[in-house]
Amino acid sequence: MRDENQVKRKLNELLMQRKIMETQAEAAAGSSQASAAGERLERLDEQILLLEWVLNEPRGRYHA
């Protein structure tokens, strides 16, 4: 299992990749690569969301 610092580093890495991918997606707008870039951005967003969830673990109980 990864510790908090490792998760934060991975989150920062994914955020940097997302910025690069957004730039590439804007450059590829209207081309055949636009849909592939959009799919990669969606996947990165999902990974980022999961890591944010790990860092900000929900508090409380599921069944109150």
Image: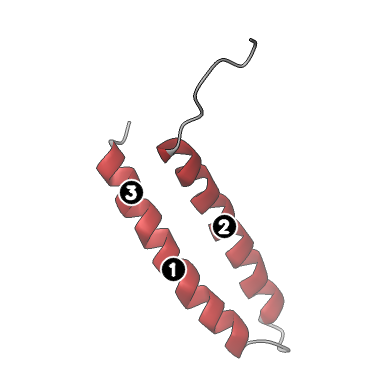
Q: If the image is split into quadrants, where does the N terminus sit?
A: top left
Q: Circle 1 sits on which residue?
A: 17
Q: Circle 3 sits on which residue?
A: 8
For the residue labelled by badge 3, is the local secondary structure a helix, a strand or a loop? helix
Image position, residue 22 (x, y; %): 55, 76
Image position, residue 26 (x, y; %): 61, 85
Q: Circle 2 sits on which residue?
A: 45
Residue 54's place in the image compared with 48, above or below, is above
Q: Is residue 5 left or right of residue 42?
A: left
Residue 12's place in the image compared with 4, above or below, is below
- Would you call the spot at circle 2 few (<14 residues within 10 Å), some (14-19), or many (20 or more)? some
- Would you call the spot at circle 1 few (<14 residues within 10 Å), some (14-19), or many (20 or more)? some
Residue 41's place in the image compared with 29, above or below, is above
For the residue labelled by badge 1, is the local secondary structure a helix, a strand or a loop? helix
- Would you call the spot at circle 3 few (<14 residues within 10 Å), some (14-19), or many (20 or more)? some
Q: Which residue is nearer to you in this view: 21 or 62?
A: 62
